[in-house]
Image: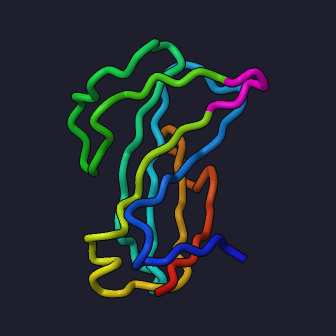
Amino acid sequence: MPDEFSVNDVRELYIYSVHTALFGEHRELRRFYAPSGELYYEKLVAYSTDLTEPVPFLEAVAVPRSKQIAAVSPDRDGRLFVSDIFPVAGTWISDRAMTGTWRVEVYLDGATQPTATLQLELVP
């Protein structure tokens, strides 16, 4: 069963991906599908293990993107944790009570198939 979150109580959700043995600069395209199955939102998230602090992400892309290329470092087990925010409160989601099971697909570095998929349940 997916994790549940209330559209009336949650301002934003932090969406994390975890990678191992990944170095250098990478991009994740994150696609958020509404309970109807329609694409609701997508965002490109950029990050790099070569940086010590974030730098502006200035490249023009065809989808919304993060404002910065995040600096990420592996933890002691070699895992990279990459996070971004998915707004809920004050959006169509809360205004239109778009409840039900949402699907998030993550595409790493231009992959044509999702690298990871998760489901979450938005409830009243």
What's the magenta bit mostly, secondary-structure-wise? loop
Q: Is residue 84 above or below residue 120?
A: above
Range of magenta residues? 75-80
Q: Residue at x 74, y 24 (%)?
A: 78
Residue 70 left/right relative to 108 = left
55 inside magenta stretch: no
Q: Position of residue 73 (x, y in %)?
A: 59, 21
Q: Is residue 122 above or below residue 112?
A: below
Residue 86 left/right relative to 102 = left
78 inside magenta stretch: yes
The residue nearer to you, when weighing 26 against 123, is 123
Q: Is residue 49 above or below residue 1?
A: above
Q: Position of residue 15 (x, y in %)?
A: 52, 53
**Picture quadrant of residue 49:** top right
Q: Position of residue 37 (x, y in %)?
A: 47, 81
**Picture quadrant of residue 86:** bottom left
Quadrant in which the N terminus appears: bottom right
Q: Is residue 22 above or below residue 32?
A: above
Q: Position of residue 19 (x, y in %)?
A: 66, 36
Q: How many marks?
A: 0
**Picture quadrant of residue 34:** bottom left
Q: Residue at x 22, y 28 (%)?
A: 58
Q: Residue extending furthest front?
A: 9
The residue nearer to you, when weighing 7 against 78, is 7
Q: Residue at x 38, y 64 (%)?
A: 11
